[in-house]
């Protein structure tokens, strides 16, 4: 003969499912709250993206091409770096990750404008930054 299933165990498993649903809701609301707290970073990035748009649409490239550094387009690079930093800090909720992603984008664009970017140079830039981020993430946990 087989034993009858206990109703008590079924209720406990039902309660566990309900508790997991409540935890999921708490985690989602916690994530929403974290994004809401980081909303100023997104709002700060918008004027810098507006500056980048203005540079692309209104200013001739030759006017900013040799500003301080030959072929650097620094009046474009600086607001783009700042805008990307704040935007990706908001997206990933970590300013370190926002900084690294904006650094990779800016270095890649700078080297491309200088005419020296190759796949090998890109990997030389990308791999140490990703390794540093991986180590920093492991240490944080």
Image: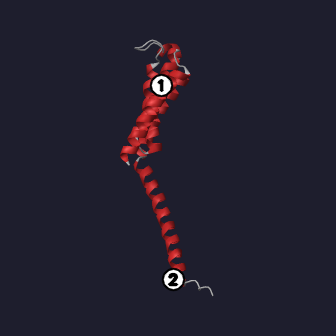
Q: Quadrant of the N terminus?
A: bottom right
Residue 136 relative to residue 108: left or right? left
- Check the image and report above or below for 1 versus 11: below
Residue drawn at x 36%, y 46% is 140
Residue at (52% x, 16% y) in the render = 61
Spot the residue most to the right.
Answer: 1
Judged from the image, the secondary structure of the residue bearing numbered disc 2 is helix
Q: Is residue 135 visible?
A: yes
* Residue 112 percent location from the top left of the image: 53, 19
From this viewpoint, which residue is outermost toward the front? 1
Mark 1 and mark 2 in contact (Cβ < 8 Å)? no
* Label annotation for residue 8: 2
From this viewpoint, is residue 47 visible? no
In the image, is residue 20 above or below residue 34? below
- On screen, 61 above or below 127? above
Q: Nearer the viewer, residue 90 or 59?
A: 90
Residue 86 located left or right of residue 113: left
Q: Nearer the viewer, residue 62 or 118?
A: 118
Q: Label 1 crowding class (10 Å Cα cut-off): few <14, some 14-19, many 20+?
A: few
The residue labelled by disc 1 is 124
- Say which mark, if any, is on residue 43: none
Residue situated furthest bottom in the rendering: 1
Query: Which element is circle 1 on?
Result: helix
Alpha-carbon span between mark 2 and mark 1: 60 Å
Q: Position of residue 134 (x, y in %)?
A: 43, 39
**Marked residue nearer the N-terminal end (2 or 1):** 2
Marker count (numbered): 2
Residue at x-position 44% and y-position 28%: 79
Residue 114 percent coordinates (x, y): 50, 15
Density class for disc 2 (Cα within 10 Å; few <14, some 14-19, many ≥20) is few
Q: Position of residue 24 (x, y in %)?
A: 49, 62
């Amino acid at each position: 003969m087989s034993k009858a299933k206990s109703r008590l165990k079924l209720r406990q498993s039902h309660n566990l499912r309900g508790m997991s649903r409540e935890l999921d809701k708490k985690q989602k609301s916690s994530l929403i709250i974290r994004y809401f707290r980081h909303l100023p970073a997104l709002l700060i990035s918008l004027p810098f993206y507006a500056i980048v748009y203005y540079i692309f649409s209104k200013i001739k490239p030759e006017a900013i091409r040799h500003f301080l550094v030959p072929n650097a387009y620094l009046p474009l690079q600086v607001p783009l770096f700042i805008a990307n930093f704040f935007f990706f800090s908001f997206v990933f909720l970590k300013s370190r990750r926002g900084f690294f992603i904006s650094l990779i984008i800016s270095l890649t664009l700078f080297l491309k404008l200088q005419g020296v970017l190759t796949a090998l140079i890109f990997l030389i830039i990308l791999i140490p930054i990703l390794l540093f981020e991986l180590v920093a993430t492991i240490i944080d946990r």
